[in-house]
Amino acid sequence: MVPDDRDDVAPGASVERVPLSREAADPALGGGRPDWGAVPGLGDDAHLTGVAEQVQELVRTQVRMRSLLGAVLALGQDLELRAVLRRVVAAAMELVGARYGALGILDDHGEGMAEFIPLGLDEEELRALDGVELPSGKGLLGLMIHQKEPLRVTDIGAHPDSVGFPPGHPPMRTLLGAAVKVRGRTYGNIYVSTRRDGHPFDHRDEEVLGALAGAAGIAIENARLFEEVRTSAERFQRLLLPRVPDLSPFEVASVYRPADAGLGGDWYDALRLRDGACVAVIGDVIGHDLVAAASMARIRSKLRALVYDRHTSPGAALSSLDRILMATEEDTVTTISLARIEPTGTGWDLCWSTAGHLPPLVLSPGGGARYLEAEPGLPLGVDPDAERPDHRYPMPPSSTVLMFTDGLVEHPDHPLDRGLDRVAEIAAACTDRSVQDLCRAVTDGAPGDGHDDLAVLAVRVPGR
């Protein structure tokens, strides 16, 4: 056993505690019991209030930054320019708590406003401003056009550049504005007025609006580029579609409308054959991009070659086209309705075949309308051995066959039959009008939701 060199202590005896160091025992050296009451700030109400305010300000700053980040991310969700512009104004109002907001878009010379997009006005305020000319870039708004830095005004009426408000304009006292730059050039200015809490705009509002303006410039540029690409793509697709020639004695008209998203694969064609027949075709290549548009052009050219120099039935032509597509096109799927209108001894026969497409609609003089129901079959590009049967229907003199793509009738909230019935109803009321008016009427009244492109083709046979 190891000896214990500590003194034995008798039970019940008092024990003196010995400090471990001199500092612990000597207050002069920093030892002894701490004097908690002497710690600066503790117990000082004013100091505690200041700390609490700093914490609250930090929280507010964090909330602002999160809100700004959310607004910036939201700007990138739209590619439609008009939607982006309105979203910019709405985000500015929300971030600084403003009652009113606007975006002024400069003209090409950068000297005045080409457009002014206001938000925040209620119905009564809008009625009061009915007929009032929108701002053109004078006064404080004009000052912002030539000023690179943000503008913060606590009293609009007292500012030397203020020119007042037009009659009926709601009262506004405070103003905060920041320039929106696109490619280094001022595109316009964001304006906000009248904080909802009644306070004037401060430097924090100015910083937030400036940051939003920077993000807005990027979002606007993206939307403009998207619009330019979509316009070019739409022009390209229209160039691929044929201009229907004079096919006398047949009357032919067509309409094509792109989808909200731009490109699509809808197409049509019509041509007069040397034997006096007329061929009409409408189709829809699966897809909504340049690939679909290019495939559409190739398919149309191949089908023209198949039907022009050969006296072949629509079903046989579709079967041949299907085999060609499977051999030459990669992953191309298209629906087609192909019709051949040929003379008989007493009138005209419509011979048609479909590949997964909607049925043709035949309109009789006097208002009759009938869909030519038949098994639609598989689209082309699925099974080259699929049967493509032909169907026949006698067309009365002056009757019309109307062919269209699904973009005319499809709507996510309604069954397809409802759309088909609506088109038949509109078309039946237009049998005494020109084929061009007929096409316009059905497209203008189309029950489709606009998210898909649409094509319409009408062919009217001669009268007696």
Image (cartoon, rainbow, N blue to C red):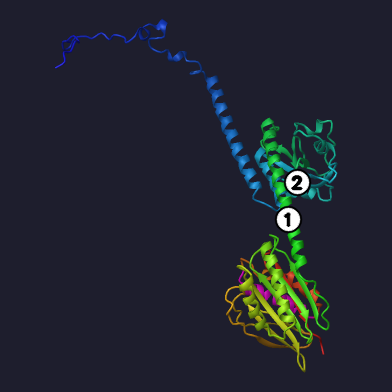
Q: Are marks 2 and 1 in contact (CB under 8 Å)?
A: no
Q: Is residue 274 above or below residue 298?
A: below
Residue 118: which disc? Answer: 2
Is residue 416 found inside the magenta-colored segment of the image? Answer: yes
Residue type, label 2:
Pro
Q: Earlier in the sequence, mark 2 or mark 1?
A: 2
Q: Quadrant of residue 202?
A: top right
Q: Quadrant of residue 62?
A: top right
- Nearer to the camera, 442 or 218: 218
Residue 61: which disc? Answer: none
Horizontal side of residue 87 vs 27, given as left or right: right
The residue indicated by pointer 1 is: 229
How far apart, in angstroms, are the residues tagged by discs 2 and 1? 28 Å
- The percent coordinates of residue 155 (x first, y second) are 77, 31
- Nearer to the camera, 110 or 3: 3
- Say which element carries label 2: strand
Which residue range is magenta in the image? 414-431
Q: Main secondary structure of the magenta part?
A: helix
- The percent coordinates of residue 32 (x first, y second) are 38, 10
